[in-house]
Amino acid sequence: MRISIVIVTYNRLYALADLLESIAGQTRMPEEIIIVNDGGESVDSLKEFYHELPIKVVDLRENCGHVHARNAGIEAASGDAIMLSDDDDYFTPGHIERMAGELSDGAQFVYSDVEIVTFKEENHVRLPVSRRLFAYTYDPVEMRRFSTYVPSGSLYLKSIHREIGYFDPEVHNYWDWDFFLRVSEAFSVKRVPVASVIYAFSAGGSHQSFSLNEKRQAFLEVLCEKHGLGKLPQKNFFVLLEEPELKMREAESRIVWDGRSIRSRLV
């Protein structure tokens, strides 16, 4: 199985370098790393710093948004399986090998638990300030009410796109929830109970999962109509985590991160 990692980036060179550093330390290498530069500063220097990694850069002339950029990455990928990642997240050692094993074990789409981490930056090194386990049972029915899917680190057969299409820009903020619902209706999905993805999250308001606004509400309404979800309210991410129904889905997971910062080759 050939794995293509698809990463969308926009002016976050040092965080992207952290991700590449985590990939370089994996026990199983991907066959291809597609970095889609969504109209931002050049990332070509990373190919020199990480010359051993099979990096292919796709430069978009202008910023077209993260959903369109991800679709461009999928189109450019040549692997049999796709692993997704945001540019500011990273993987703990063994993640790719573990996920590849789970995909080969009969599932067509696998995703892992994550640790939500808030960082502060000093001299381009991100230092963890807080960490929180994000691990919930997989329930297809409950996923229609509360999505607990984090795309970073998930792995799936690329052939899925031939049957259900690409990511939908019409739902923008909810592209991942929409994709998960479409996948779970037609394919075998498996949650891997290991928190092997470090998910960078800021509660300061800049993170798209944190902000609430009219545009986000409009995208939520499109998602609800598309999947017949009824009327779901916008909710702040951390408030959502305290919902009783979501608390009931909390699950055990193996913690594997040692809590240390990544120091990339750029610093």
Image (cartoon, rainbow, N blue to C red):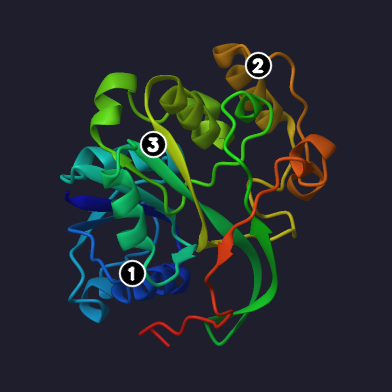
Query: Tags 3 and 2 in contact by the CB under 8 Å rule?
Result: no
Mark 3 vs mark 2, CA separation in Å? 24 Å
For marks 1 and 3, the one nearer the N-term is 1
Label 2 neighbourhood size at 10 Å, few (<14), some (14-19), many (20+)?
few
Mark 1 vs mark 3, CA separation in Å? 24 Å
For marks 3 and 2, the one nearer the N-term is 3
Tag count in the figure? 3
Foreground label between 3 and 2 = 2
Q: Is residue 88 above or below residue 84?
A: below
Foreground label between 1 and 3 = 1
Which residue sits at x=82%, y=40%?
A: 243
Instruction: Please give left or right for residue 255 compared with residue 161 in the image.
Output: right
Q: SS at mark 3?
A: helix
Give residue 68's mark. 3
Using the image as rendered, state which of residue 171 and residue 242 is in the foreground: 242
* Residue 59 in picture, x, y percent from top left: 27, 52
> Looking at numbered disc 1 in the image, what kind of residue is underneath it?
Ile
Instruction: Please give left or right for residue 202 compared with residue 71 in the image.
Output: right
Instruction: Please give left or right for residue 129 compared with residue 69 in the image.
Output: right
For marks 1 and 2, the one nearer the N-term is 1
Which residue sits at x=50%, y=26%?
A: 181
Q: SS at mark 1?
A: helix
The residue beneath circle 1 is: 23
Q: Is residue 175 visible?
A: yes
Label 1 neighbourhood size at 10 Å, few (<14), some (14-19), many (20+)?
many
- Determine which quarter of the picture holds residue 158: top left
> Looking at numbered disc 3 in the image, what kind of residue is underneath it?
His
* Residue 140 in picture, x, y percent from top left: 56, 27
The residue beneath circle 2 is: 229
Give residue 238's mark. none
* Residue 103 in picture, x, y percent from top left: 31, 45
Which residue sits at x=74%, y=35%?
A: 213
